[in-house]
Amino acid sequence: MMKKFCIALCFQAFLLIVAATEPIPTTLDGPFKPATRRFDPSLRKGSDDLPIDHPRLKRNVTSFFPEQIALALSSSSSSMWVSWVTGEAQIGLNVTPHDPKTVASEVWYGKESGKYTMKQSGVSVVYSQLYPFEGLWNYTSGIIHHVKIDGLEPETKYYYKCGDSSLAAMSEELEFETFPLPAPNKYPQRIAVVGDLGLTTNTTTTIDHLIMNDPSMILMVGDLTYANQYLTTGGKGASCYSCQFPDAPIRETFQPRWDGWGRFMEPLISRIPMMVIEGNHEIEPQAAALTFQSYLTRFSVPSKESGSNSNLYYSFDAGGIHFIMLGAYIDYNQTSAQYSWLQDDLKKVDRGVTPWLVAAWHSPWYNSYSSHYQEFECMRQEMEQILYAYRVDIVFSGHVHAYERMNRVYNYTLDPCGPVYITVGDGGNIEKVDVDHADDPGKCPSPGDNIPEFGGVCHMNFTSGPAKGKFCWDRQPEWSAYRESSFGHGILEMVNSTHALWTWHRNQDIYREHSHGDQIYIVRRPQSCSVASKDSRLSPSIPPTLDIAAARVSSLLCYIILPVIILIGLLNNH
Ligand SMILES: *[C@@H]1O[C@H](CO)[C@@H](O)[C@H](O)[C@H]1NC(C)=O
Ligand SMILES: *[C@@H]1O[C@H](CO)[C@@H](O)[C@H](O)[C@H]1NC(C)=O
Ligand SMILES: *[C@@H]1O[C@H](CO)[C@@H](O)[C@H](O)[C@H]1NC(C)=O
Ligand SMILES: *[C@@H]1O[C@H](CO)[C@@H](O)[C@H](O)[C@H]1NC(C)=O
Ligand SMILES: *[C@@H]1O[C@H](CO)[C@@H](O)[C@H](O)[C@H]1NC(C)=O
Ligand SMILES: *[C@@H]1O[C@H](CO)[C@@H](O)[C@H](O)[C@H]1NC(C)=O
Ligand SMILES: *[C@@H]1O[C@H](CO)[C@@H](O)[C@H](O)[C@H]1NC(C)=O
Ligand SMILES: [Fe+2]
């Protein structure tokens, strides 16, 4: 009996070995020896912004017909946000805001094409971006509509139209499919992760590639349009901003780029939800100390639904994944409202229902590029402990314009229960790809570099390891598993409650099938990395080094020792 079992088991193991000639690594094989893919200097050449009259950016509708249609998940699979814009934005002198009440916000929807059995209404809003400074232009938006539709069934296709039926200004019919209810064996099929996108020809490559990978949702980790990098004053630009506008204490950020971006993204995000979190390019300060007006007005996120009092941080479920979207540009200190919300949210997560816990925010804590090196060290010091204690599985960030995947790490120490940190700020924006590593000779930033737009500076020298007493390593740090300076995007596919396949696609591979830049199974170990009990929440259990040793012994047993025993047994029988 025992022997039969062993033969079956090891036969399976043999098949696995034979079948997988090039096995995809898993995080259990880690920590990995740090690797850097050599940079191809031809990629350093960036790309230009798409012109504002480019077909994919142009306003194709007239009067109050809907455009820039976008979907976002609400807190559960039974509801969905639909957002769109009507009317023309204005920029220049003496702009007059639209009256948002003049156009209604309706979504008609149902399970059969052309048959809209349900209807919901929502809100309409406008925002203005004002620069009362000599030479600069004011902007006021079209009417921005947000409707939450609910009563949806999970895993069901819906057809919808949006607009104002009284003006006979409804959109074409569009469709989307709802996600499964939260459960440990139900997941959205493919989640695209992208950051620092911008609106250039490199962005076009990224998005076309992403569409070819057929995602069911997009996680957008901040820095969406780079409207604030666009040439000011109607795109004419100023070679020396402070000379031309000596009176202006702030930079103009060219809001029509947001409308262009909304149109550029519409073919994708009117069919699948996009979940956003703010980056530094969304701050967009204007007169009267207003910030984040475009981000806050244009996007619906399930903040109220998730108990947050700000659209700058929130959470939601997508099948068996609980996502936590953190704000890096709003108070994150342990004394802050965001931190108490985070504590409550983490407490509520039931890993029996949503085994996967994925967090995302814009600026990475672990980053070995010179760009933004240790910039968000204050945020890490405030928040890392609680995320670790609750066993966050994966963290996605952007901000650095390159790709990097970390070994599991906690407090700058390799730790089998730490999250897998991944930087995908490589969407293709105008600022070009980041190439310097802080460990390259002469590339270690000086203390005055990398000051965050928000929060304090907490740069620190390492207290142990090869970089002890120093600010930078002299080689790729041990916590950095893989890095590459290319543009691209990632796709996350949950296999089950313990295995997820992560694939990073570089832009150069767009027309090469089955080609990718980085691929790994991210494996959860709920037994050995259990969530600490409620009382010891902030003193996590000891990393299970023993457990790893046990796992190694048992796999050694199965793959090498047992086959040998069986072979001997078989030989003896003959
Ligand atoms: C960006 O696009 C330009 C022009 O198409 C191309 O030469 C360059 O290699 C791209 N950059 C990257 C990092 O892919
Ligand atoms: C922009 O708006 C501000 C505030 O309403 C106003 O003071 C300023 O004159 C406007 N600027 C232009 C160029 O219209
Ligand atoms: C506008 O219409 C043209 C031609 O049909 C199309 O190529 C383009 O993608 C459309 N743009 C938007 C933003 O819908
Ligand atoms: C967060 O705490 C740090 C250190 O106590 C402090 O310097 C910083 O100003 C605080 N940030 C906010 C937004 O209160
Ligand atoms: C993290 O490591 C530093 C030393 O580098 C230590 O001072 C600090 O107490 C550690 N933090 C935690 C939460 O363990
Ligand atoms: C931190 O490291 C830098 C070099 O990496 C060194 O110049 C500096 O003196 C160190 N600071 C402290 C407080 O040790
Ligand atoms: C998840 O899938 C992997 C790979 O197919 C398998 O090895 C593992 O046992 C599965 N885990 C669960 C909990 O079903
Ligand atoms: Fe950024």
Image (cartoon, grey):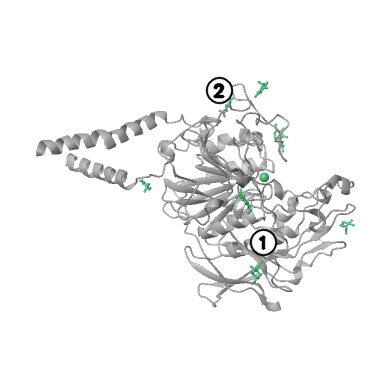
In this picture, residue 243 sits left or right of residue 565: right
Amino acid type, mark 1? Gly
Query: Disc number at residue 485?
Result: none
Q: Is residue 213 above or below residue 501?
A: below
SS under mark 2:
loop
Q: Are marks 2 and 1 in contact (CB under 8 Å)?
A: no
Q: Nearer the viewer, residue 95 or 322?
A: 95
Which part of the image, by quadrant, shows the N terminus?
A: top left
* Occupied quadrant, residue 62: bottom right
Residue found farthest to the left = 574
Query: Measuring 71% from the left and 38% from the top, which residue is drawn there?
Result: 452
Residue 546, horizontal then vertical, whole percent: 39, 28
Within 8 Å of ligand 5, the CB of disc 2? yes
Q: CA distance from mark 2 to mark 1?
A: 47 Å
Which part of the image, by quadrant, shows the C terminus?
A: top left
SS under mark 1:
helix
Query: Measuring 47% from the left and 35% from the top, which residue is drawn there?
Result: 417
Q: Which residue is mark 2?
A: 464
User: Can residue 271 be seen at all in this image of the molecule?
Assistant: yes
Q: Is residue 315 above or below residue 549?
A: below
Residue found farthest to the front = 42
Q: Is residue 249 above or below residue 183?
A: above
Q: Which residue is mark 1?
A: 262
* Occupied quadrant, residue 461: top right
Query: Measuring 51% from the left and 52% from the top, which residue is drawn there?
Result: 491
Residue 570, horizontal then vertical, whole percent: 14, 39
Q: Is residue 46 above or below residue 533?
A: below
